[in-house]
Image (cartoon, helix red, strand yellow):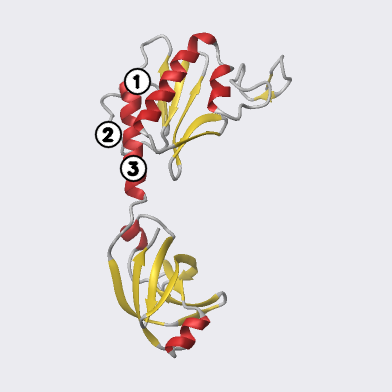
Amino acid sequence: MWTCPKCNREFKNKEQDHFCSEAPKTIDEYINIQPLETQEILQKVRETIRIAAPNATEKISWQMPTFWQSENLIHFASFKKHLGIYPGEMTDCPFEDRLQGYHRTKGAIQFPYNKPIDYELIRDITLWRVSCVQEKNAINDKIYEFDAVIKPTEKGVYVEFPYDIRTEFGKGRVKVHATFDGEHYDGSIVNMGVKNPDGTVCYIIGVLKDIRKKIGKQVGDSVRVTIKERE
């Protein structure tokens, strides 16, 4: 263990980068406590990301400057010898050729300060992350229509959504406009621990008591269902 001589905090790694005082609450605060020779670089990185992601919100997350757009879009951080860029999972990143020569981990890239910072690459990585988030959160305009049997569970009454929810919507919980025999209901398709006979996850939407009363249906009855994603 290594003990910082300034704040007496203990760390696993010797001379580990950390904040000796209270962590900054804004990106301005973060940049202002960095060495003067790196502040200009950090401001330019910040502006590069801001231009590439104009709808993102600035915040501090994980003690790093962060741009948020439905999720953490990208982080950056300053270290003694390098700038860290953290765009998250990069398995499908389309810039493999341009990233050659940089030290990388699964979700991080190190830009050494002894070489010119490739702001154009940072911009393109940010644009890629924006497109990933937009695609992930795009509304599916398709209307799904099917017959389903009303079933009981300990937590309520439901019908199964008979499609692969992640294939159709790219997520595991979806807000939807639904109808049951024409009766409208706004709810969500969710995983409530219900399993298919083969053990796979069954995604469901609840059928409220008031809805069942209006359409005159109970557990065991078949109902016509329509589903459309909502914001």
Taking the spot 61% from the left edge, 16% from the top edge, the residue there is: 15
Q: Position of residue 96 (x, y in %)?
A: 28, 29
Residue 119 is labelled as 1
Residue 74 is labelled as none
Q: Position of residue 60 (x, y in %)?
A: 55, 32
| First-in-chain label (3 vs 1) | 1
Q: Is residue 126 visible?
A: yes
Taking the spot 34% from the left edge, 20% from the top edge, the residue there is: 119
Q: Which residue, as the protein is rendered here, is positioned at the far right?
A: 8
* Tag 1: amino acid: Tyr
Nearest to the eye among marks 2 and 1: give it: 1
Taking the spot 52% from the left edge, 82% from the top edge, the residue there is: 209
Q: Position of residue 33 (x, y in %)?
A: 59, 17
Q: Is residue 140 above or below residue 61?
A: below
Q: Is residue 110 visible?
A: no
Question: Element at badge 3?
Answer: helix
Q: What residue would you read off at disc 3? A: 132
Residue 94 is labelled as 2
Question: Element at badge 2?
Answer: loop
Q: Residues within 10 Å of mark 3 (few under 14, many from 20)?
A: few
**Left or right of 126, for residue 218:** right
Q: Which residue, as the protein is rendered here, is positioned at the far bottom?
A: 216
Nearest to the eye among marks 2 and 3: give it: 3
Taking the spot 53% from the left edge, 9% from the top edge, the residue there is: 36
* Cα distance between the residues tagged 2 and 1: 16 Å
* Tag 2: amino acid: Pro
Q: Nearer the viewer, residue 45 or 160?
A: 45
